[in-house]
Image: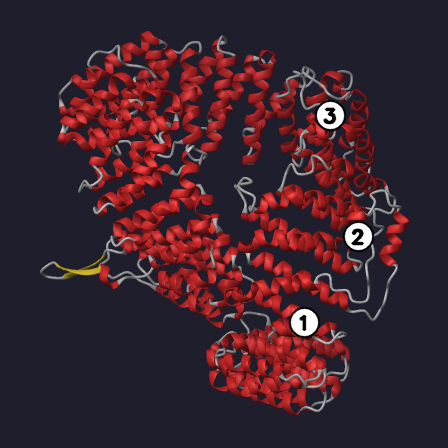
């Protein structure tokens, strides 16, 4: 039936009436788009012939629709039909009438874009390529040649790697066109060769390059042909030896060099110096214009008219030297972006030149110079993130020295008439402030006239005003308020008038600036260095005008609300009359879904004001609105609401009724769960605030006990509880024991019973630790008497020898440890001996808890218990591992909390070190790890003693000692700044060079230390990376000598001893990509190292997938260059099926691995241009065609 319908449509399509033909073609298009449509063998030829005829229809509308029909048609007819259609269209393109050529070209491109199967692609290539090449070689008109080259470029881009045997023939034909006369043919030939290049063999690519270089060496060639060749390959010598007036040749040479810098960073390395010198020479190349004005002698007060005249005194339409300057600026930009290691050199050589060229007379070139300078600033920010002004060669320090010159030069640009120039100048200053936040303190005064003019001048565009406002806001936010006090009068009027601007983006930005202005006017409520009172009225009225107006953009509404909250919290004492009018508007905004979040945050700002603003007129309404928000689904709103309620209770607690408190507590209780720990922490914080502030109200205590306590006791059993939420829970119990109607004993009992094993098994280790911490806090809050009785009770549990109560003993030990850490327990006789008795327990968890308890009790009184532990380690060989754990607890606490260091630093340190170094060579890995952690943490306390002692042991003959030293270094590198850092700068290379050690355990320890350094203190290792990276990459390679076969009788088992090392090395690279990307050359890592990792063991593949995702995101071009070769190992991974007899664990691991690979594929698919790789496209098709994979892929993308 459907086919009969199509036959009718086809008949109508050939009718005489063009409207009929149009309607029929439209009907055909909708039929073809139906998924159910299928053409039979008789219908196919009719269908294709009719659609091709319609392409030549006299009516443009009909032929346009016919082109649209081709896309679905390609998928609905046989491959031979598609090939037949392409042949006919190609014939029309080359031999047909002129008027039909464009349509044939568009039609061919449409068909090629729709081809997805490799078999069809190959058939089309085999029939099309020779015809197109023939058209390129023999066509009479340049137009036909261009069309043929255009389509050939499309075909080669998508399917170039399918017919390798014809590559040489095609390449020769295309290279011959480089000498062709029309420039358009030469340009199209270049893009064609560029499309073919990725799929050429190395030999053919070398041949092509060689041929173009030979053409370049032909000095007698016409300059335009040489230009083409330069565009093709680029050569250093041609830039300088071009004839005087051949600016285009210089431009193309510089463009080629720019392309090399960005696309072949590895190969161009030796020529970087030369390219930099060339670009610097030609960035000021202007042979037809001599600039007599010397920047340094330029008077600041020079009249504007003079400036404009000087800028326009020379114009020549034929002068093309600006193209050379523009190309040089872009080439410099490419060097800055691709060569972070040359940054300091760029500041010494390129930075002064760029600042000098800010006076460029051609506006477009000036914009490129601004952009290049901005790139230099951005790269400085990227490379020096987290570093201070370390030394005089640091880019940040070098930039600081240039600030006065930059400001002077930019000031001149702000006096120009051109709006575009001023916008560019503000962009430079903006980036400068982002990279060096306090750099304009001495220069802001000179910028004020420029900012004023940009905001006041009637000719200023919105864009210019926004740039000026953003700069003002950034400077205000990052500099000391005193910098602005002399200029407040000059700046406040234009800022306030910008609030009334008609364009909403200007208004919004002006309101943000106004917020900063408020802080500047009154940075400190106690002392005032500027008289702010005259400004309060105008600022308040300007904002109120925007706040009260409902009919405006959301961004303006939000900025007005935020700004008004700042005004009220800063100047509230001078606005008593205005508050009754203004606060209800803010309350009203809380009722509007669009602005409620901003309004909630606004009340938090007001409530936190030291001025204690009078909110009595709206307080009840605000509290009831906020309480209702706690039930809303919007997470951000609930978070902001909890914070605001907390501030309101602290400041206005006495004015809130007890019934409101009960409602708030009831709502709070529903937010406490381990599903959202951040929300839980905020809810518990608010609960504590209410209890501390209102502890005399009985109802509050009862409500908390009935509603919140049960939730808290469920939460405390969670294995996920940690960090901020755990601290908030501890404060909750401490507050609750002091609240009305709550007995200590009942609370203690409920906590202890929470630790009992449930039906589903014993509690997680983390849950027991959480309960112990809460018990300790509860005891300390309840006072000494309760605390002492609890400790005696816990001691009683430990003295009870029966093995039935092991869970109770475990809990008692953890509680004693937590109490002991916070309080000196030396009053409790023999407590250390009672704890050490538990070292004999048959249960591992009790032994571990006992060592933890002993260490923490020692923290409470170092002078008494530390000698006891050291004495025990000497005398008790069997208990050494546990005692070392106790010692580790002491040392780790001291390295973080410096209160007891003086006691630790006496003779004890010598004793501890001797003891630890004795155990460095222990055969037990567990002992060595504890020793390493102890050594690492002591080195934070006593770096001058420890670092040299560790350094000596890097050359110890015992491999175990060398490994222990490397792990110790790993523990000594922590995120916060420490005194060890200065010593480590010069010494760390000795430790990291253990990566060359002969023992694999030592190499792995060095890799882990490198990984920790890269994560916590990247500046320590940045200078060493050029030497270390090749050694690190070497650890990622599968080494056959580390693979051994173990004979287990009935079967043999292969053991890979290098697996852990490879996994650690890849994880280290993953960390380096986050912190030291500027030092890593991705191209040299991807092939061969990452490629081999993607086909390695499960444990290695997982970090490799993460690395691939990161590289796809941060260095897409490097990944795109080798995408075809990456596809193969990933495809194997997602196609892998576990053996039939595999256990559940193996099946789960395989599932995890497939999902991990799909995440990497998802990242690859986001790279622009990834769909040009036929292999990757086939992989994506395979995933979508396999239901199981497609489902996993979609769920991974939605994560």
Q: Which mark is residue 475?
A: none
Q: Earlier in the sequence, mark 3 or mark 1?
A: 1
Decide: few, some or many residues near mark 2? Use Cα within 10 Å; few <14, some 14-19, many ≥20.
few
Q: Which mark is residue 521?
A: 3
User: Could you say which quadrant of the image residue 1044 lies in?
Assistant: bottom left
N-term-proximal mark, 2 vs 3: 2
Q: Nearer the viewer, mark 2 or mark 3?
A: 2
Q: Position of residue 490 (x, y in %)?
A: 82, 32
Please state which of residues 818 and 576 is positioned toward the viewer in this rendering: 818
Q: Nearer the viewer, residue 6 or 504?
A: 504
Which color scheme is applied? secondary structure
Q: Residue 865 at what x, y percent from top left?
A: 25, 19
Q: Which residue is mark 2?
A: 294
The residue identified by callout 1 is: 240
Q: Secondary structure at mark 1?
A: helix
Instruction: Tell whether label 2 touches label 1 (CB within 8 Å).
Output: no
């Amino acid at each position: 039936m459907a086919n009969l319908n199509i036959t009718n449509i086809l008949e109508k399509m050939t009718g005489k009436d063009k409207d009929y033909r149009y309607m029929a073609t439209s009907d055909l298009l909708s039929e073809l788009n139906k998924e159910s449509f299928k053409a039979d063998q008789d219908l196919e030829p009719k269908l294709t012939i009719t659609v091709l005829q319609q392409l030549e229809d006299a009516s443009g509308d009909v032929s346009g629709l016919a082109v649209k029909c081709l896309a679905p048609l390609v998928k609905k007819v046989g491959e031979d039909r598609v090939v037949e259609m392409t042949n006919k269209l190609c014939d029309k393109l080359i031999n047909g009438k002129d008027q039909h050529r464009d349509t044939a070209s568009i039609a061919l491109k449409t068909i090629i874009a729709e081809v997805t199967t490799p078999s069809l692609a190959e058939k089309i290539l085999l029939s099309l390529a020779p015809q197109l090449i023939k058209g390129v070689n023999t066509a009479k008109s340049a137009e036909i040649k261009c069309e043929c080259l255009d389509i050939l470029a499309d075909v080669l881009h998508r399917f170039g790697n399918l017919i390798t045997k014809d590559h040489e023939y095609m390449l020769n034909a295309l290279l011959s066109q480089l000498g062709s006369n029309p420039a358009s043919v030469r340009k199209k030939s270049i893009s064609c060769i560029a499309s073919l290049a990725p799929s050429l063999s190395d030999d053919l690519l070398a041949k092509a390059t060689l041929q173009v270089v030979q053409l370049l060496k032909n000095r007698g060639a016409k300059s335009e042909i040489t230009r083409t060749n330069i565009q093709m390959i680029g050569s250093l010598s041609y830039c300088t030896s071009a004839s005087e007036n051949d600016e285009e040749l210089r431009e193309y040479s510089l463009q080629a060099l720019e392309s090399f810098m960005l696309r072949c960073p590895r190969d161009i390395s030796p020529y970087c110096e030369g390219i930099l010198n060339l670009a610097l020479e030609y960035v000021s190349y202007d042979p037809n214009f001599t600039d007599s004005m010397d920047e340094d002698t330029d008077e600041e007060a020079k009249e504007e008219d003079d400036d404009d005249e000087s800028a326009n005194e020379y114009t020549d339409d034929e002068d093309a030297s600006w193209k050379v300057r523009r190309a040089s600026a872009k080439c410099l930009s490419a060097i800055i972006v691709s060569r972070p290691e040359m940054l300091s050199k760029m500041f010494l050589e390129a930075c002064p030149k760029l600042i000098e060229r800010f006076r460029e007379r051609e506006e477009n070139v000036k914009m490129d110079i601004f952009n290049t300078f901005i790139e230099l600033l951005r790269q400085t920010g990227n490379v020096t993130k987290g570093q201070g002004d370390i030394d005089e060669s640091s880019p940040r320090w070098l930039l600081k020295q240039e600030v006065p010159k930059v400001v002077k030069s930019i000031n001149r640009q702000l006096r120009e008439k051109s709006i575009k120039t001023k916008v560019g100048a503000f962009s430079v200053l903006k980036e400068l402030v982002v990279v060096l936040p306090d750099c304009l303190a001495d220069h802001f005064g000179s910028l004020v006239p420029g900012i004023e003019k940009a905001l006041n001048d009637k000719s200023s565009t919105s864009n210019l005003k926004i740039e000026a406002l953003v700069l003002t806001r950034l400077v205000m936010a990052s500099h000391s308020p005193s910098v602005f006090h002399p200029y407040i009068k000059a700046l406040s009027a234009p800022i306030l008038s910008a609030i009334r601007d008609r364009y909403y983006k200007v208004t919004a930005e002006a309101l943000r600036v106004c917020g900063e202005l408020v802080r500047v006017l009154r940075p400190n409520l106690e002392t005032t260095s500027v008289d702010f009172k005259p400004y309060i009225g105008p600022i308040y009225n300007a904002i109120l005008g925007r706040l009260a107006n409902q009919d405006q953009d959301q961004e303006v509404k939000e900025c007005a609300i935020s700004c008004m909250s700042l005004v009220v919290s800063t100047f509230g004492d001078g606005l008593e009359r205005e508050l009754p009018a203004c606060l209800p508007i803010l309350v009203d905004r809380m009722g509007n879904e669009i602005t409620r979040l901003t309004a909630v945050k606004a009340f938090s700002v007001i409530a936190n004001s030291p001025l204690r603003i009078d909110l009595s007129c709206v307080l009840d309404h605000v509290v009831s609105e906020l309480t209702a928000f706690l039930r809303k689904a919007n997470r951000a709103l609930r978070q902001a609401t909890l914070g605001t309620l907390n501030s309101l209770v602290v400041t206005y607690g006495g004015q809130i009724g007890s019934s409101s408190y009960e409602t708030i507590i009831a709502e709070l209780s529903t937010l406490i769960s381990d599903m959202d720990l951040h929300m839980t922490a905020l809810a518990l914080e608010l609960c504590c605030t209410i209890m501390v502030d209102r502890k005399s109200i009985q109802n509050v205590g009862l409500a908390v006990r009935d509603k919140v306590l049960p939730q808290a006791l469920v939460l405390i059993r969670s294995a996920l509880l940690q960090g901020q939420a755990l601290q908030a829970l501890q404060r909750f119990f401490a507050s609750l024991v002091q609240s009305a109607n709550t007995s200590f004993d009942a609370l203690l009992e409920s906590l202890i019973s929470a630790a009992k094993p449930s039906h589903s098994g014993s509690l997680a280790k983390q849950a027991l630790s959480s309960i112990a911490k809460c018990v300790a806090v509860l005891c300390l809050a309840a006072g000494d008497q309760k605390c002492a009785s609890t400790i005696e009770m816990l001691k009683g549990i430990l003295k009870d020898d029966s093995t039935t109560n092991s869970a109770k003993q475990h809990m008692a030990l953890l509680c004693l440890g937590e109490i002991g850490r916070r309080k000196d327990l030396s009053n409790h006789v023999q407590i250390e001996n009672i704890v050490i008795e538990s070292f004999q327990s048959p249960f591992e968890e009790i032994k571990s808890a006992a060592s933890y308890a002993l260490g923490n009790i020692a923290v409470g009184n170092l002078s008494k218990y530390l000698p006891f532990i050291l004495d025990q380690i000497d005398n008790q060989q069997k208990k050494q591992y546990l005692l070392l754990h106790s010692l580790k607890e002491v040392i780790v606490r001291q390295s973080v909390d410096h209160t007891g260091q003086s006691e630790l630093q006496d003779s004890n340190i010598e004793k501890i070190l001797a003891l630890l170094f004795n155990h460095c060579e222990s055969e037990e890995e567990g002992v060595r790890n504890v020793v390493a952690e102890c050594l690492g943490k002591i080195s934070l306390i006593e770096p001058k003693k420890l670092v040299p002692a560790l350094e000596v042991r890097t050359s110890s003959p015992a491999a175990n000692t060398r490994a222990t030293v490397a792990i110790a270094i790993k523990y000594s590198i922590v995120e916060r700044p420490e005194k060890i850092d200065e010593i480590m700068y010069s010494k760390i290379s000795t430790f990291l060079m253990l990566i060359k050690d002969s023992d694999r355990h030592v190499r792995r320890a060095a890799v882990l230390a490198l990984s920790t350094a890269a994560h916590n203190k990247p500046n320590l290792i940045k200078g060493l990376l050029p030497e270390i990276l090749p050694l690190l990459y070497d650890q990622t390679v599968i080494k056959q000598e580390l693979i051994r076969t173990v004979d287990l009788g009935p079967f043999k088992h292969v053991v890979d001893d290098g697996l852990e090392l490879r996994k650690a090395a890849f994880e280290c690279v993953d960390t380096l990509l986050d912190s030291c990307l500027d030092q890593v050359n991705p191209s040299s890592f991807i092939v061969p190292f990452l490629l081999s990792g993607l086909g390695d063991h499960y444990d290695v593949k997982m970090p490799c997938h993460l690395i691939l995702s990161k590289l796809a995101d941060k260095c897409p071009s490097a990944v795109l260059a080798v995408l075809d070769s990456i596809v193969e190992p990933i495809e194997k991974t997602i196609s892998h099926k576990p053996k039939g007899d595999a256990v559940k664990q193996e099946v789960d691991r395989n599932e995890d691995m497939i999902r991990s690979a799909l995440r990497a594929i998802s990242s690859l698919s986001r790279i622009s241009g990834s769909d040009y790789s036929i292999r990757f496209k086939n992989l994506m098709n395979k995933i979508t065609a396999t239901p199981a994979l497609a489902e996993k892929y979609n769920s991974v993308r939605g994560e």
